[in-house]
Image: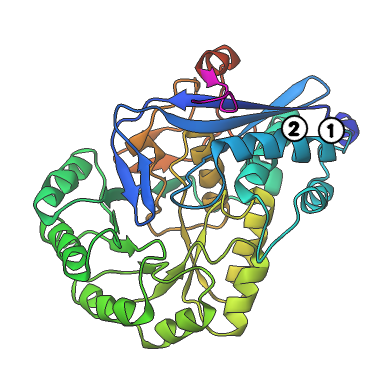
Amino acid sequence: MGGELAGMRIDRVETFAVELPTHRSFGVAGGSVAVAGTPSIRILVRVGADGLYGWGEATPIPAWTYETAESIVTTVDRYLAPAIIGTPAWNLDAVDTAFDRAVNRGFSIGAPLAKSAVDVALHDLLGRAAGVPLGVLWGQRRTSSIELGWIVSGQSPAEVGESVAEGLAEGYRAFKVKIGLHDEDTDAAVVAAVREHAPDAPLWVDANQAYTVPVALRMARRLDALGVTAFEQPLPANDIAGLRRLRDLSAVPVALDESLRHPGDLATFVRLGAVDVAIAKVQRSGGLTLSRRLCSLAEDCGVELMGSGLTESDLGLAASLHLFAAYGITTPVDLNGRQFIGSPYAGETVRVENGTARVPEGPGLGVEVDESVVRELAIDVLEHRA
């Protein structure tokens, strides 16, 4: 198998924009992510080499970042795929270089969601070719299960109790609250309501870049009194000076998400003393290749790691679980796809019980994809709309 793997070359890259069922509505400071009853679009990518295939996923959320369903499809089909056809499937470094030449970096990284879908599909392909899960392929897995957090998003204080009760009934023991959706007092009241209904639960908040430094400092004092363990991305991603000031003065550890597109971004924040906690997020960092570099850098620099996702279906969920397990992330993580959307294309897949996800043991990502269902769910996102 080793010789066969060494000789495999990428010969096909396909995109499928699929409509997945939405269970609950979900919003962030930038706008809506999911609307109950309205299908959620995800872009699935299939990469082939010598008759074997791997799958990856991209989550178009314009409320969170600039990539749309249309741009992800055209970026993969017209730029990334032609750049890597014929490349040895094992040569992830060459693929990363080809990606940067095809869609170059701006301030940080170009088209990370599109690049991530292809990169993850290649990892899945390599694991399947070797017949082992990603942890075995990497020689690195420190845990076999990951605790998930239940997401409280866009709720008024009066509605929070119902959301927390639902999470507790599902077996979740940790909660993450999306803030920055309201004024300061309402945001603080929502967090206080979660703490009232879950007095002993691990609790952290995510502002998704919504605040200014003065507002964030006031909020940090209120959050500290509520026992919040991390204040995620309170300021705009590129406000390095503001984040450094906030890190020095905040009563709650500041965690960076949108600021860390590329490992080089983390290196900058470390040199400037502007980061307490680094969020590992596969899609934001262009896939597993760069995410592993970022996680290793955080470890080497003594920066705490937390984990998060982008409301992925089961392919993205599995990719994140393999990454977080490799680095032994023990704090609860925000992998909320199961809470908001379904994955009807997936057969044998990730097992989640009582708020804890088991790292898949099957080859590659460990998710069995039914291609016929993918094709049934597929839509043409590039067709003309009046």
Name the residue tied to disc 2.
130
The image shows residue 252, relative to residue 333, as above or below, that is below
Amino acid type indicated by mark 2: Ala
Asked whether residue 380 is drawn in magenta, I would say yes
| Numbered range of the magenta stretch | 378-386
Horizontal side, residue 157 vs residue 110: left or right: left
User: How many numbered dots are placed on residues in this image?
Assistant: 2
Rendered location of residue 92, percent (x, y): 78, 47
Along the viewing direction, whichever of 122 and 324 lies nearer the viewer:
122
* Residue 133 visible from this viewpoint: no
The image shows residue 157, relative to residue 224, as above or below, that is above
Which residue: 86% across, 32% down?
9
Specify the quadrant that holds the N terminus: top right
Mark number for residue 35?
none
Which residue: 62% across, 83% down?
271
Amino acid type indicated by mark 1: Leu
Name the residue tied to disc 1.
5
Q: How crowded is mark 2: few (under 14 residues within 10 Å), some or many (20 or more)?
A: some
Along the viewing direction, whichever of 36 and 336 lies nearer the viewer:
36
